[in-house]
Image (tube, rainbow, N blue to C red):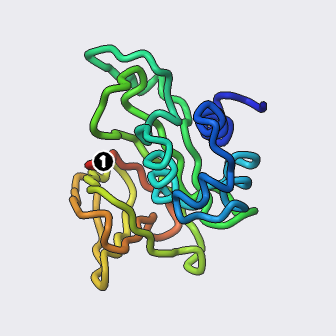
């Protein structure tokens, strides 16, 4: 089945455990079967939105695809122990736009998804708005961030925060040629 530490392999495992075909998953998420196949086989996902749809269709949390299933409290995430949990590319063949590091490994009963995210510069043509259920809270640690929210554009400096409803079309990306690093908490009420 491929590397179980890879996002696509974990999604495939959950889908197969629920005896759901790719076509059934595509129908219940509104995504195409080709997208599901690409995600499972190539670990390619353009944004968090489709992953949330898949998690909802499989009746699991988004973080289920990124961590083990042993719940414990409290969770301490040491900077020195972080590993890459998810890489998102905006377009096939392009370099990563986001590198996610989960900050809640081991807590399977969580209601929020906390991450440290490395946001890499990307060409203007790759910038696309996305929307999904829930809310997001971001605090910028380094670099400069461009946030498009609906029809408004905001620029964040280190220490700045933004909190918004994710259903509104939005874009978050590094502003300029330097990467940005941020802490993000995603909440999905489902």
Q: 149 and 58: which one is in front?
A: 58
Q: Residue at x 61, y 30 (%)?
A: 17
Callout 1: few (<14), some (14-19), or many (20+) C-alpha neighbours within 10 Å? few
Secondary structure of the residue carrying tag 1 is loop
Left/right of residue 168 with respect to residue 120 in the rendered view: left
Q: Please identify the residue farthest to the bottom as the structure is shown.
A: 151
* Residue 117 visible, this angle: yes
Residue ID for mark 1: 190
Quadrant position of residue 91: bottom right
Residue 106 in the image: above or below residue 164: above
Residue 120 in sight from this viewpoint: no
- Residue 75 lies left or right of residue 88; in this view the side is left
Look at 25% across and 53% down and name the residue there.
137
Residue 105, by quadrant, is top left
Q: Is residue 41 left or right of residue 57?
A: right
* Residue 147 spot, x, y in % from top left: 34, 70
Q: Tell me: residue 5, above or below residue 100.
A: above
């Amino acid at each position: 089945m491929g590397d179980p530490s890879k996002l696509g392999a974990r999604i495939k495992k959950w889908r197969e455990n629920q005896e759901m075909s790719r076509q059934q998953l595509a129908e219940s998420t509104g995504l195409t079967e080709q997208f599901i196949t690409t995600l499972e086989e190539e670990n390619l996902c353009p944004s968090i939105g489709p992953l949330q749809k898949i998690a909802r269709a499989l009746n699991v949390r988004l973080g289920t695809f990124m961590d083990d299933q042993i719940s414990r409290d409290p969770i301490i995430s040491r900077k020195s122990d972080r590993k890459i949990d998810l890489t998102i590319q905006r377009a096939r063949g392009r370099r990563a736009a986001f590198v996610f590091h989960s900050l809640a490994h081991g807590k399977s009963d969580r209601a929020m998804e906390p991450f440290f995210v490395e946001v890499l510069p990307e060409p203007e043509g790759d910038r696309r708005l996305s929307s999904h259920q829930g809310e997001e809270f971001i605090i910028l640690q380094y670099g400069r961030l461009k946030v498009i929210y609906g029809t408004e554009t905001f620029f964040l400096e280190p220490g700045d925060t933004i909190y918004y409803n994710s259903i509104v079309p939005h874009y978050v990306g590094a502003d300029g040629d330097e990467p940005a690093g941020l802490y993000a908490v995603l909440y999905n009420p489902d």
